[in-house]
Amino acid sequence: MAVVRIFDEAEKSENGGGVEDVIAMFRLMSGAEGAQMEKGTSDHAGIRFGLYGAGLLGSIIPGGMAPQDRSRFVMLTLGDRPASANPTDAAMYLEELEQEAKAAGPAVWRRMLRLAPKRWDSAFRAYNALVQSMGGRSRDGDTLGTMLAGWDLMLFDDPLVDAETGKARPERLDRASALVRPLIQETQEADELGEGERLLNAIFGGIIHKEHGGTRTVAEEIMLLNSANHDPGSNDSIMIGRFGLRVFGEGVGKKKLFVANAENPALNKALGGTRWRGGGHKAALQTIPDVQPYRGTMRVAGRTQRGLVVPARFLPGYESGASDGGQGAEE
């Protein structure tokens, strides 16, 4: 049975186990053996099921991914809708767009299913080779080549490989190269991330519950504090203080991050499902060059704590070219 699974609002969970389990399932499904499951039958015989396939996750804050996931998932970012001076016109345009999408969607699927037996294999082979020729690894070629083959079937009447010459159409490959180049770069950058950088990304994705409702991420709060010219006090960092964090230093985009050595419940939630919970974050942070112990103590969330200083260049809102400067005054 073939089933398409689409998960909307697949946000990072606070306690782990939510969308992270779905990501783990997709990781297994993408392997050569698929996700294996064994069950017994009524006559005591054994039966094995193999689950293969793909899914679509939609989220504002992606769930936690292991390094190997970045070569299995294609991450696409939707652009913002252009602002409109007339909200009524914008609402009517959005309604028209939804109606067109509902009509075009089934037609696109029919087209792909009709053309796939004739064109899929040749298109996939050509795009797989293209991705690898641009520096992608074999798995990148499989993942991104699949995406490009689907893109080709959706948009073009003529097959990618010219029947007369037996070669891929150069203009089509040029368009595909422009689409896939940033995706290859993102995958390569993810492979280069060390233990400490992956930990920081997990912390920055932590969810803050605001006092009067609503949520924001730790990254958004740090970016807000980093946009001010003055040195934020302990009162300015109350929300991220719950995670044992405090932004300090002067200058727009020049501030540093204090991370308390001690574990706390909010930080453990942000690091749910990782090996950094329970105080393991300290050792991981120390793998980052230039992360140093803070001289003295820092007041965070009403407590005097010891911790580490993360340089400005690793923080959301960092202004390139800004100096990290010193550690600032001790408290």
Image (cartoon, helix red, strand yellow):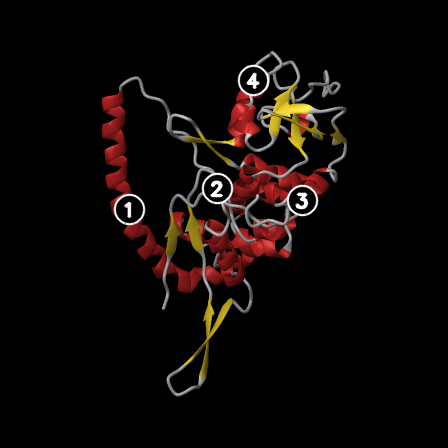
Q: Residue at x 53, y 58 (%)?
A: 27
Relative to 170, does residue 52 appear above or below in the rendering? below
Q: Please say if the residues under marks 4 and 3 sit with CB atoms less than 8 Å apart.
A: no
Q: Residue at x 66, y 46 (%)?
A: 191
Q: Please say if the residues under marks 4 and 2 sit with CB atoms less than 8 Å apart.
A: no
Q: Which mark is residue 104?
A: 1
Q: Which residue is mark 3?
A: 280
Q: Which residue is mark 2?
A: 76
Q: SS of the residue at dot 3?
A: loop
Position in image of residue 73 (x %, y %) = 52, 50
Q: SS of the residue at dot 4?
A: loop
Position in image of residue 126 (x %, y %) = 55, 56
Position in image of residue 66 (x %, y %) = 59, 50
Of residues 152 and 259, the one nearer the viewer is: 259
Q: Which sits earlier in the primary sequence, circle 1 or circle 2?
A: 2
- Mark 4 burial class by Cα count in 10 Å: few <14, some 14-19, many 20+: some
